[in-house]
Amino acid sequence: MRDADVSRMAAGAPFITHPMKGRFNAVFALTVDPKLANRRPIASGHCEITDGDLWEVPALSQVIHILALSPVSEKRIDSAILEFTVEEDRYRIDKMYFLGYPVSIFGDGSASLTGDWIDVTFTPRLGKQDWNSIIPIIGAPLDLLSNIFKGIFVSISLTGSFEKPAFKVGQDAAPSAEVRKLIEEKSPR
């Protein structure tokens, strides 16, 4: 898929309150093993969004809500990369990052194809120049924001199911070595 219009792809979605934009490019591969006649095919893909404004994506806005960030007039997610593999009973997120302002989000994990369970870890990062542009609202976890700003890896895990997702902040969801490397390479400076 080449240069699809994100605004047209998101048109009519009930969670969109701010126009989304960007260019969507993707490559998908599908493999079927003839020896496995009654099984699902295996698929993988690489999706990329450039020149974007994706702040309204539910998973991203939930992470921002957990961080208790007050509104930022120029907030946006500019670009996104998602690489995944669909297996027999689950899909696996092999690489995921959303680069934006004031927060970029990195992660990996997996979920069942039926939506019965989710196990995804998000690691937010603030760009150094962005600290003054966010003000935690009353009762916000100031230590959490301070740790993120200092460069300490504080992850948010998404578990539960598609119908009843649960978010948890803390050390139980430390980022994998692959995500740490990705953060070092791509995190805003």
Image (spheres, helix red, strand yellow):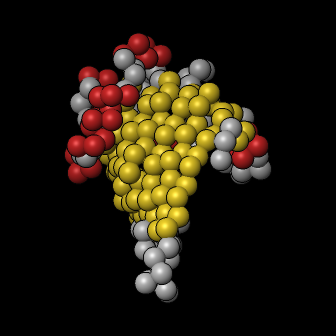
In percent of width and height, residue 144 lies at: 30, 33
In percent of width and height, residue 67 lies at: 41, 36
Q: Quadrant of residue 55?
A: top right
In percent of width and height, residue 161 lies at: 46, 66
Q: Residue at x 61, y 41 (%)?
A: 25
Q: Residue at x 58, y 37 (%)?
A: 49
Q: Quadrant of residue 181?
A: top left
Between 183 and 70, the one nearer to me in the picture = 183
Compared with 13, 92 (above or below) is below
Compared with 106, 134 (above or below) is above
Between 27 and 160, the one nearer to me in the picture = 27
In percent of width and height, residue 76 lies at: 57, 28
Q: Is residue 92 visible in this depiction of the protein?
A: yes
Give the position of the C terminus as an image quadrant.
top left
Left or right: where 143 falls relative to 116? left
Between 95 and 107, the one nearer to me in the picture = 95
Q: Is residue 58 visible in this depiction of the protein?
A: no
Q: Residue at x 63, y 40 (%)?
A: 24
